[in-house]
Image: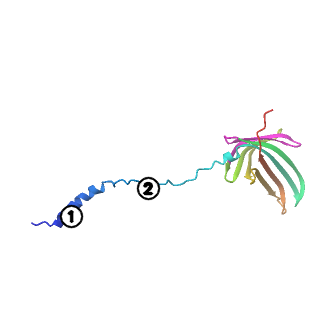
Amino acid sequence: MRTSTFAIIAVIALTALPALAQVPPAPTKNPPAVTPPITAAPVDYTKTYQGFWGCQMTFTEYSGPNQRSSGFVRNFGMLLNADLTYGIEGVQPGLGNYYGNGKWSADVNGLVLQGQETLPPYPPIPGVIITFKPDGQGGLTQRIDTPAFQGNYIAQSSLFACTRQQMPKPQ
C-alpha cells in the first residue's frame, strides 16, 4: 500500500488546525487606541433655576376686545430649594400677604411648580401649577391668556416675570 505524500501532509494539516486556532496572535508593539463612544453628560437643569427669584404677576380682566375691566398686581419672592421644594411669599394689594409651597422640576423648556397657594383668611388652593420659561435674558416669564366664552377676545390675562435676586436677610 502506497501512501502519497500529499495525503500525509493533508492529515497532518487537518489534525494541527484546531490547535492552531487556539494560539493567540502575537502582540503588536503599539496596539491601536480604542476610543470609547462619546455620550453627552446628562444636564441638570435644576441647578440653572435653584435659588431666590423676585417675581411680579399682573392679572387683567377684559369685558371686550382691549377693554380692561379689572386687574391686580402681585409681587412675590420665590425660593427654589436644592431638594426640589419651593416656597413663595408675597403681597396682593387690598388683600394682604399670601404664600405657597410645593415641589418643582426643570427641564430644557423651563420650570414647573406644583403645589398650593394660601391667601388668608381663605382656605388653601391645592393643585396650583405654574410654568415658567427662560426669557433669554437670565429671567423667567410666562403669559397665560384665557379666551372669552362668547366673542373673539381675551377675557383674562396673567403675565409673570421673575429675575434672580440675592436672598433677603432675615429680619
- Kind of residue sitting beneath label 2: Pro
Q: In which quarter of the image is residue 96?
A: top right
- Kind of residue sitting beneath label 1: Ala
Q: Residues within 10 Å of mark 1 (few under 14, many from 20)?
A: few
Observer-nearest of 85 and 124:
85
Q: Can residue 122 be seen in this view?
A: no
Which residue is found at the position 69% from the left and 54% from the top? 109
Q: What percent of the width, then of the height, locates residue 81?
A: 70, 40
Chief secondary structure of the magenta portion:
strand
Number of labels in the image equals 2
Which residue is found at the position 69% from the left and 45% from the top? 104
Observer-nearest of 166 and 101:
166
Q: Tell me the colour scheme of the image.
A: rainbow
Element assignment for label 1: helix
Q: Marks 2 and 1, how far apart in space?
A: 37 Å
Q: Which tag is nearer the camera, tag 2 or tag 1?
A: 2
Q: Name the residue under label 1.
A: 10
- Say whether marks 2 and 1 touch (CB < 8 Å): no
Which residue is found at the position 20% from the left and 62% from the top? 11
Q: Name the residue under label 2.
A: 32
97 in magenta: yes
Observer-nearest of 14 and 24:
24
- Per the rendering, the mark at residue 87 is none
39 in magenta: no
- Residue bounds of the magenta highlight: 81-105
